[in-house]
Image (tube, rainbow, N blue to C red):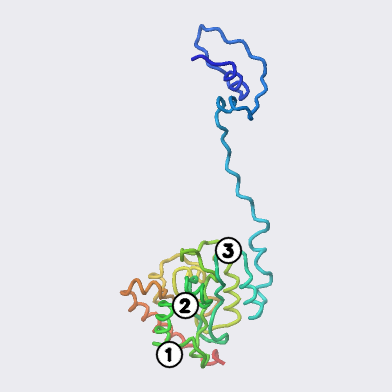
Amino acid sequence: MRWTERQRALLEAMGLRLWVPAGVAQPEPLPELALESTTADTAADAPSPVTAPEPTPPPSAPAAARRPAGVATMGWAALREAVAGCTACKLCQGRRQTVFGVGNEQAQWMIVGEAPGEQEDRQGEPFVGKSGQLLDNMLRSIGLTRSPGEPSRQVYIANTLKCRPPGNRNPEPEELAQCEPFLIRQIELIRPRIILAMGRFAVQSLLRSHEPIGRLRGRVHRYQGVPLIVTYHPAYLLRNLEDKARAWDDLCLARETFAALPAEASA
């Protein structure tokens, strides 16, 4: 192959040497040429440069720094405001509004779900739509309600995440970690006598367990000393009707556990 002087110069400028068969005299080195990337013929001869992808710039501040400080000591009003203004993870970019929680803040029962869906994102309330209707029916079957009334019959409902994941995808570990202090503080403020954890991510967050729900349900667990019952999420039950009977068993276990609590705990 015959190389033009320009091609030889380009190769030498890139630190490459021509391969010449044995017995053939090496070409004399060429004087250095000024390579101008702006000339049309040089651009035609030279290989296209490979541009490395730009690295993702680090966040301007750690994610936790964008969550308001002092969550562990906040009252209800400050906590609600902190959730509404939180930008600690990327979910804040696509939400319509945060979903804080609903119910009696002195309720003896607490329901913990997973993450808001589309309807929750629109209305700002957990468990609405078909899954909310099913939850209301489940609660009503054991004498509970999210409506105003006697605290022993009321529930407080909160989600593990306060913002909707795009397309209702599963929560990511970072998102769960950033939102966890809000849920912990809600539980501390409510001081429920019993917790009903609905769905895999609620169970994982509260029990620090990756066991499937099928292996965790059917017995009483503890969260910070509070009895905790594991059951399926209503959205799951709408897709798996055969597990409704198991969910009913879980509700009965929760009711029996609550009834067996010492009377002085309700004072």
Q: Amino acid at mark 3?
A: Gln
**Badge 1 element:** loop
Mark 1 crowd level (few <14, some 14–19, many ≥20, 10 Å Cα): few
Q: Which mark is residue 93?
A: 3
- Give whichever of 138, 210 is nearer the camera: 138
Q: Is residue 219 visible?
A: no
Residue beneath label 1, please?
143
Q: Secondary structure at mark 3?
A: helix
The reply to whether the C-beta atoms of the residues labelled 2 and 1 are less than 8 Å apart is: no
> In this figure, which residue is indicated by the disc labeled 2?
127
Give coordinates of residue 186: x percent, y percent. Answer: 58, 78
Q: Where does the image place residue 121, in percent across and percent down from the top left?
A: 51, 72
Q: With respect to residue 130, does 175 lie above or below?
A: above
- Lower position in the chain sequence, tag 2 or tag 1: 2
Looking at the picture, tell me which residue is in the foreground, 236 or 212: 236
Q: Quadrant of residue 65?
A: bottom right
The Cα–Cα distance between marks 3 and 2, rounded to whole angstroms, is 22 Å
Distance from disc 1 to disc 3, alpha carbons, whole Å, reads 39 Å
What residue lies at 48% left-to-right and 15% top-to-bottom? 1
Q: Are marks 3 and 2 in contact (CB under 8 Å)?
A: no
**Of the residues shown, which amino acid type is indicated by label 2?**
Phe
